[in-house]
């Protein structure tokens, strides 16, 4: 079964709800059509059985728990209606109102247990706090009880991680790939994925800059493990290395246990870097529709000179179905 794990649907009612709740930056934001038949046609043309929707990228944060929870309930209910209306051609990763832990647990339980969502979608940080903030531990525990899939995707509004990224859409070009790479590393090195091995983490955009900077990060970790830079920086510089839950023979190994979608079709050479970092055996088809193009995303895999025919088959038609265990769509 062919599943596109990275797609977005920002319903007009969702944008309007966020504006009603106080998001002044969205008054002129685009509002997508509620009729998804055109999207279904493109899925059919590319033999995609199911597309997983998420609102992440344009998150629900409005700054107070009641409003954030209301925004999440609205978009999750909207997605549940789409899944039913299109008889399983769409699934969804639910939104939750972190950093408000109690509200996030309540909505995650409702979305997974009652609405039957495919997983939970998270941004890479929450109101300036990293994804592994210690106060979020009850949330991770609740997801682990359900062996949830966790989809991590950058939010453009959080991408100004450097003052030079404020202009010319540099946030999306540089900030977003950096965000998602940092989130993957923090989930691994903070011990979340070790404490809760039943969670299935999927990171957008091939992990962003992760495959590009993989070797640099690995070399830096080995400097700390072997204390080979003591003369330059002293022993205390790498004192944190002893607290990491890593295999010292393979310090990046935890990152090889995650899953990554392929929505980086504008940079074909990423596949070469993936081969030499976490490996193509962890890739899932992702399009970033409708911001990007599903047809181009499928062709990106089919035409890649860096992938064997067997690898292409597993990325397109096998791996996401095995990982997510979604039901086949009903006959239309």
Image: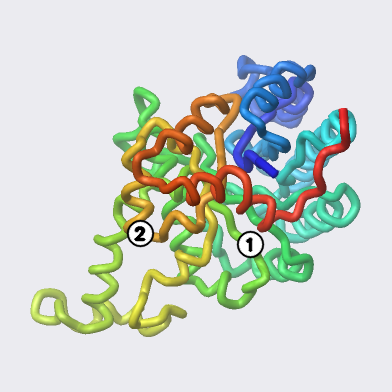
Q: Would residue 247 be visible to someone looking at this image?
A: yes
Secondary structure at numbered mark 1: strand
- Give the residue pinned by disc 1: 200
Q: Would residue 19 be visible to someone looking at this image?
A: no
Q: CA distance from mark 2 to mark 1?
A: 19 Å
Picture quadrant of residue 84: top right
Residue 277, numbered label: 2
| Quadrant (top left, top right, bottom left, bottom right) of the N terminus | top right
Using the image as rendered, state which of residue 134 and residue 203 is in the foreground.
Answer: 203
Task: Give residue 254's position: percent from left, percent from top.
Answer: 47, 70
Classify 238 as above or below 81. below
Classify 178 as above or below 245. above
Residue shown at the point (82%, 48%) measured from the top left: 327
Residue shown at the point (75%, 50%) measured from the top left: 118
Picture quadrant of residue 217: bottom left
Task: Give residue 152's position: percent from left, percent from top.
Answer: 57, 50
Task: Give residue 47's position: percent from left, percent from top.
Answer: 66, 31
Residue shown at the point (57%, 43%) measured from the top left: 316
| Quadrant (top left, top right, bottom left, bottom right) of the C terminus | top right
Classify 5 as above or below 9. below
Using the image as rendered, state which of residue 215 and residue 72 is in the foreground.
Answer: 215
How many other residues sit within 10 Å of disc 2, few (<14), some (14-19) or many (≥20)? many
Residue shown at the point (42%, 71%) measured from the top left: 253
Dot 2 or dot 1: first in sequence order is: 1
How many other residues sit within 10 Å of disc 1, few (<14), some (14-19) or many (≥20)? many
């Amino acid at each position: 079964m062919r599943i596109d794990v990275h797609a977005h649907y920002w319903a007009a009612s969702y944008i309007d709800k966020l504006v009603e709740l106080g998001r002044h930056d969205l008054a002129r934001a685009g509002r997508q059509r509620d009729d998804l038949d055109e999207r279904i046609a493109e899925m059919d043309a590319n033999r995609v059985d199911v597309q997983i929707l998420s609102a992440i990228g344009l998150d629900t944060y409005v700054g107070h728990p009641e409003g954030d929870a209301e925004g999440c309930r609205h978009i999750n209910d909207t997605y549940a209606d789409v899944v039913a209306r299109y008889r399983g051609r769409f699934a969804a990763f639910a939104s939750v109102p972190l950093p408000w832990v109690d509200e996030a647990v309540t909505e995650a339980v409702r979305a997974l247990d009652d609405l039957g969502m495919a997983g939970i979608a998270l941004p890479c940080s929450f109101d300036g706090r990293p994804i592994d903030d210690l106060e979020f531990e009850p949330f991770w525990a609740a997801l682990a009880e359900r062996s949830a899939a966790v989809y991590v995707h950058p939010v453009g509004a959080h991408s100004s991680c450097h003052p030079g990224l404020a202009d010319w859409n540099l946030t999306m070009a540089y900030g977003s790939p950096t965000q998602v790479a940092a989130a993957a590393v923090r989930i691994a090195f903070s011990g979340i994925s070790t404490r809760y091995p039943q969670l299935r983490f999927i990171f957008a955009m091939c992990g962003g800059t992760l495959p590009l900077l993989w070797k640099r990060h690995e070399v830096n970790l080995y400097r700390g493990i072997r204390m080979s830079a003591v003369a330059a920086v002293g022993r205390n510089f790498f004192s944190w290395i002893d607290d990491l839950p890593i295999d010292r023979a393979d310090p990046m190994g935890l990152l090889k246990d995650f899953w990554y979608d392929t929505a980086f079709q504008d940079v074909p050479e990423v596949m070469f870097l993936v081969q030499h970092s976490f490996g193509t055996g962890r890739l899932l088809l992702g399009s970033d529709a409708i911001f990007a193009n599903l047809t181009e995303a499928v062709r990106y895999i089919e035409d890649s000179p860096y992938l064997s025919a067997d690898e292409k088959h597993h990325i397109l038609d096998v791996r996401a179905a095995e990982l997510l265990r979604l039901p086949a769509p009903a006959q239309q």
